Image (cartoon, rainbow, N blue to C red):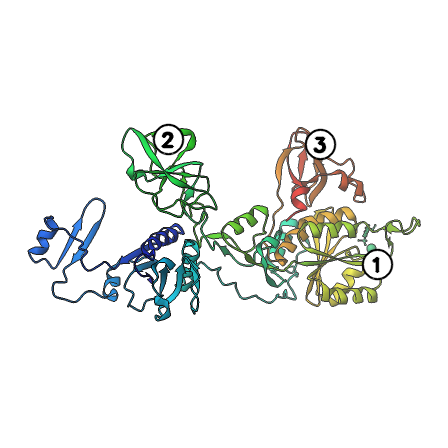
Amino acid sequence: MKVFGVVGWKNSGKTGLMERLVAEISGRGLRVSTVKHAHHNVDVDQPGKDSHRHRQAGAVEVVLASRKRWAMMHELRDAPEAEIDVLLPKMSPVDLILIEGYKRHNHPKVEAHRVETGRDLLARQDASVRAVASNSVPEGLTVPVLNLDDTAEIADFILRETGLAQTPPPLPEIAPPQRLKNDCFALPPGVDWTPVDVALDRLRQTLSPVVGQETLPAHDALGRILASDVQAVRANPPCANSAVDGYGFTHDSLSTGAQVLPLADGRAAAGGPYGGVLAPGSALRILTGAPLPPGVDTVILEEDVTAKDGHIAFEAGLKAGANTRRAGEDVDAGAPLLPAGHRLRAPDLALLAATGLASVPVWRRLRVGILSTGDELAAPGSTLDPARTYDANRPMLLALAAGWHATPVDLGHAPDDRDTLRKILDRAADEVDVILTSGGASAGDEDHMSAILRDEGAMAAWRIALKPGRPLALGQWQGVPIFGLPGNPVAALVCALIFARPALSVLGGGTWLRPHATQVPAAFAKSKKPGRREYLRARLTEDGRAEVFKSEGSGRISGLSWADGLVELPDHAVDVSPGTPVRFLPYSALFSS
Ligand code: AMP
Ligand code: MG
């Protein structure tokens, strides 16, 4: 149990400070008890009471209990007055015990001071005084001087000194980036055509994060993936406060029937707390979000009272605690907020801010290199030669990587030449965490990407039972994973969305992503043979049915742009006719992560 004292000369304001500190610190969700050292002629019992009679008769201890509270009285008789060390172990466990008085004992304390008392400060002689809370600025002190009226500042000081201040949890050790296993893309022997789900499972099991971690200011972490679970540093709300504009009072002080309460001076507003203690039987103007001051546990809506001549009148019947928000009713301090692997979105940033997380441990952004291959490729508009193909995959894949919150790195275009390809991959391996290439992924004469990976890059050629798509060359170049996508833009897009999207998420520290699909009625007819999963370029009609592009030709880039998503037809045979439910995967989900 933590202990902190408040001392001060007579009229220094120490009891007022105690009272405000108890309210402030309990309002922050900590349990506080107090010890008060009373003047020698104060008695806790009164002659004539039954308890007094028990004591007189010789009881060692008397417990006096009623419906509201109980107290134990211990008879000192001729024994010396109890030291604080004897009293503290008798108290119930709480977070903090504030002690008023006992100034000669060496527990840490704050000294209340008012310049009007004219007394010199205890702090000048007593090293156990850790700070002075004063209404002036006394000179020549070696301890901090706090503002006697700034209860929050004094509470902050006490909580820091006692180690009760809520500090952000220590950030985890930053793990160095890992390397994938050399044979991670190898398929089990004997596998020829790989069904899409088998290929996805395989990727899912073998991939792990390849980036390092860093700590970022939470407000800069949009789109980043948490590297560890995060917990609330502070409760939300941090203290009990009013949920409405109205009038606050103690519910206990109400009688039955119509109520008339005098209004106290002042008010409590969000950012402008009341500062005092509201007397029982009176009411205080209170605004939405204002911390409930001591003496207020219930608030009545301003619409439900009539206010006149410094009084408010209203009907009884309000429940205790009405129109107030409990400290921590949304999130408790220390409660789990978001798990490792979660990608931060705008509302998550609000949650982190509200619960006091100024910084968060995140994975570094995945750097994704994009390389196009093929002698026929040229930059758009750079030539009128009809034998050349304008490079359509590179801008598409760079844009996809950006939409997936990665850092796209343009690796340019490689000719169908092994030496050049090798040099480009060597350089890229230093610069990026993963490489997406397109073209040259099959087993043809000019398919140099798959050839070089097969010979030097631990390649596994996956023949996936997928249309459009099929060849997916997976390999590693100096430990950097490479996804060799088909050259055909339609197949390149489908393979990127179905395979690269979830794989890149895991490589960047995130979770395995399943495409978000909705069942919609088909607006088309198609008879599909068994064996390969098919993705059709599709969009929704106004009445929510999926129509497909007029041609399934894999060179039809216009269909990619015409579409708003893909219709996924299963591996087995299906006969789709208008109205048959089909799975629609919207671009909006596939293009984000
Ligand atoms: P490949 O996989 O290299 O045999 O290429 C298959 C088809 O896709 C060929 O017609 C290529 O010209 C075409 N292609 C390959 N890469 C691209 C690209 N980056 N942009 C447009 N078409 C491409
Ligand atoms: Mg080619």
* Residue that badge 1 annotates: 446
**Numbered disc 1: secondary structure:** loop
State left or right for residue 357 relative to residue 151: right
Residue 457, relative to residue 232: is it above or below? below
Residue 275, relative to residue 458: is it above or below? above
Label 2: how many Cα within 10 Å (few below 14, some 14–19, many 20+): few
- Residue at 78% x, 62% y: name it: 451
Mark positioned earlier in the residue sequence (1 or 3): 1
The answer to whether the beta carbon of the residue marked 1 is less than 8 Å from any atom of ligand 2 is yes
Q: Nearer the viewer, residue 108 or 224?
A: 108
Which image quarter: residue 323?
Answer: top left
* Residue that badge 2 annotates: 309
Ligand 2 positioned in quadrant? bottom right
Tag 3–tag 2 contact (CB < 8 Å)? no
**Numbered disc 3: secondary structure:** loop
Mark positioned earlier in the residue sequence (3 or 2): 2
Residue type, mark 3 in image:
Phe
Residue 409 spot, x, y in % from top left: 74, 58
Label 3: how many Cα within 10 Å (few below 14, some 14–19, many 20+): some
Nearest to viewer (mark 1 / mark 2): 2
Residue 164 appears in view: no
**Numbered disc 2: secondary structure:** loop
* Residue that badge 3 annotates: 524
Nearest to viewer (mark 3 / mark 2): 2
In three-dimensional space, the C-alpha distance between marks 1 and 2, rounded to whole angstroms, equals: 94 Å
Residue type, mark 2 in image:
Asp
Q: Nearer the viewer, residue 433 or 454?
A: 433
Residue type, mark 1 in image:
Glu
State left or right for residue 81 relative to residue 242: left
Which image quarter: residue 375?
Answer: bottom right
Q: Nearer the viewer, residue 408 or 372?
A: 408
The answer to whether the beta carbon of the residue marked 3 is less than 8 Å from any atom of ligand 1 is no
